Image (cartoon, coloured by chain):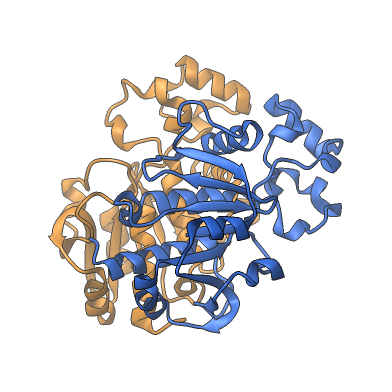
Chain colours: A orange, B blue
Amino acid sequence: LILAQTALETIPRELAQHPAVVADSKRRRKPPDEILLDRSVHHAAMSRLKEARSRGRPDIAYHVVLDVTCAPAYRCRSLKLYVHTRNDLVISLSEDVRPPKSYDRFRNLMEQLLVRRQVGEEKDLMTVKEMKLRDLIAEIKPGKVIGLSRLGNRADLHELVSGSMGKKPCFVVGGFPAGHFDDETTSLFHELCSIGGEGLEASLVVCRLVYEIEKSLGLG
Amino acid sequence: LILAQTALETIPRELAQHPAVVADSKRRRKPPDEILLDRSVHHAAMSRLKEARSRGRPDIAYHVVLDVTCAPAYRCRSLKLYVHTRNDLVISLSEDVRPPKSYDRFRNLMEQLLVRRQVGEEKDLMTVKEMKLRDLIAEIKPGKVIGLSRLGNRADLHELVSGSMGKKPCFVVGGFPAGHFDDETTSLFHELCSIGGEGLEASLVVCRLVYEIEKSLGLG
């Protein structure tokens, strides 16, 4: 399972001087380039940022990572999770990882990971490297790559999952709040499917997907 | 759907003088009794607190409220959500509510709600009143009350939901990190069911439950 083009990045250089960023940097006692860009804090600074609508939502990765890692399918190693960011960093999570439940601690861990490229105690539990989504998929070598997007063909999630479980599938869900996968990402999919008429939150899609995976595997 | 005995409360008076609480109170510029008890911040202060294991986890309510309110079943008014806290406060959420995605904003909103018993702009969207779980259920008048707990009888979630949808069911999920429903709560259930061998996170249970409700209703 890949959360792709995730809105998870440190504050870009061009916003470092904005008053909203300077104030937050002072409050948190960290330089801007070691703080996650977060619309709920840096909204004012983001107005002139390129592709602002799809950026600054670290809560999406937080929800998805927690939801996936606590699921039985994950704990019994039937599922692997990667978080691919919009800046082409790939975070790999070990099956034994227990990410912090508190958002503040999760945020601090992600900041450490994105800036120092490693985390102290849990260094084998979460790793990060520069990698395009294309290269990540080449490394995983899935039998089938299925993107989930409301622009895709309408599919029943249960049938989609049960019909592909024998093929070492790789499911790709967008980790951004608005917009769609870019053309390069879409070109990597064997299928693009929609599991809901309206746009669904990434965490909702992921929860349902993992649940169907468990059902297909006869877990629980 | 009721999230019951939720670990959502302001810091109790007996912890107000603890250094960890005083420091947080100073940092947040709020008195302790207007700050949510949070194990990730007040861990040191909680060691001698009664029933500490099942307290101080506001992130549980945060995850569940976000997960439920973004689901199609909720948006199309097929489902109502109540958060019952361990101090017998009941938060009712309107079908039109759009809770803040950011944890900090959610926390501030809950603090305002628990302390002032109302929220400014969104006053009809979230209301709170003192009420026991028993009285809430008497007010809702469900045809059937189903508690979900790993102490319950093993049930298939799909069958459980599809078999009860005609009966105006009320599902009750625990909003606490450890332990079980208390005896008074358990006495309110017509059935106590377990949908997973091991303990599952409340948000995971709720996501799966809402998904099965949507399937039963033929939504999406």
**Residue A110 locus on image (x, y percent):** 52, 45
Q: Is residue A181 left or right of residue B197?
A: left
Residue A104 seen in this snapshot: no
Instruction: Report the residue at 27% width, 31% height from top.
Output: A51
**Residue B63 locus on image (x, y percent):** 50, 52
In the rendered image, the vertical position of residue B122 relative to residue B15, given as above or below: above
In the rendered image, the vertical position of residue B86 relative to residue A179, given as above or below: below
Q: In the image shown, does B143 or B16 lie closer to the viewer?
A: B143
Q: Is residue A150 left or right of residue B194?
A: left
Q: In the image shown, does A11 or B75 lie closer to the viewer?
A: B75
Q: Quadrant of residue A167?
A: bottom left
Which quarter of the image is occupied by the C terminus of chain B?
bottom left
Q: How many marks?
A: 0
**Residue A84 locus on image (x, y percent):** 36, 51
Q: Residue furthest left?
A: A153
Instruction: Report the residue at 61% width, 28% height from top.
Output: A28
In the rendered image, the vertical position of residue B86 relative to residue B172, given as above or below: above
Q: Is residue B10 left or right of residue B18?
A: left
**Residue A147 locus on image (x, y percent):** 23, 60
Residue B59 seen in this snapshot: yes
Q: Is residue A63 left or right of residue A46?
A: right
Instruction: Report the residue at 42% width, 78% height from top.
Output: B160
Q: Quadrant of residue B218?
A: bottom left
